[in-house]
Image: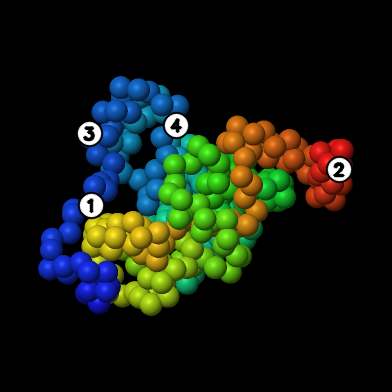
Amino acid sequence: MEAYYIELGLDSKTGVPSSSRAPFDNKMCDLVMEFHPEVVSFHFGLPDKNLLARVRRAGAKIISSATCVDEARWLEDQGCDSIVAQGYEAGGHRGMFLTEDVATQVGTMALVPQIVDAVKVPVIAAGGIADARGIAAAFALGASAVQIGTAYLLCAEAQISRIYRQALKGVKDNETAVTNVFTGRAARGIVNRLIREVGPISDVTPDFPIAAAALAPLRTKSETAGSPEFTPLWSGQAARLSRELPAAELTRRLAEEAQIALNHGVHGLSRALAQAEALGRK
């Protein structure tokens, strides 16, 4: 990072802030016990069995992400009530925990039915799902629900920066990549200068989450100048399908359109959307 520090006028020998990221621990579990959420969802596997037992005593259902069948089976064996099948298309951090080989990660449409066949608990499809067509496809493959992330980032309620929002509005289908250069763990984001020049995957990236702290001064300085080149811009591959609507309105439309697609097929959905657009013009 030294060349970037020099370019941006930063002292590369200045200490960097420590990362605030921490694994789920007793202190976090105390909050679960206090507030009794209906669901507690984990990523990168699960915490230890004592913490899981406390979560369950609080009355919460336990969910975690799997990026392959082996991970799904492991999560079921540990007592998960539902499993998120995270396809390779998904934005943000990969939930992988039994493997570090990004090259073998599976796409959503191939992953979901295989996990559905392998476990008895409900499966939630995630990754590249941003509209009713993706929702209907996931249900057809056996998913009990879908998890949508990137499609909500253009909602006013999403507290993302202006440069992040602008990047999402302009991203193309082939302009994201899985990279480890921002945090030390594999995650999908919009390709920018740091990914192009240092990654996407680097074998000298510090372990998670140290890399994020090392990049913090560069990110702050470049964002202040309006540049996204050192900022993690997490995004799934279907970002272009996002709509700039209030979150409640987007949720309502996704539900209504998915119901049409499930009842009448994708062609029926296309006709219904065309009719709605025509009525809107009138």
Residue 254 drawn above or below residue 19 = above
Q: Secondary structure at mark 2?
A: helix
Give SS at disc 4.
strand
Precedes in sequence: disc 2 or disc 4: 4
Q: Nearer the viewer, residue 68 or 220?
A: 220
Q: Residue at x 73, y 35 (%)?
A: 256
Q: Is residue 19 above or below residue 246?
A: below
* Quarter holding residue 54: top left
**Residue 207 visible in the current orientation:** no
Is the C-beta separation of discs 4 and 3 under 8 Å? Answer: no
Q: Which residue position holds label 2?
A: 278
The answer to which of marks 1 and 3 sits earlier in the sequence is 1
Q: Residue at position x 30%, y 22% from top?
A: 34
| Alpha carbon distance from label 1 to label 4 | 26 Å
Q: Position of residue 46 (x, y in %)?
A: 35, 45
Residue that carries the numbered disc 1 in the rendered image: 19
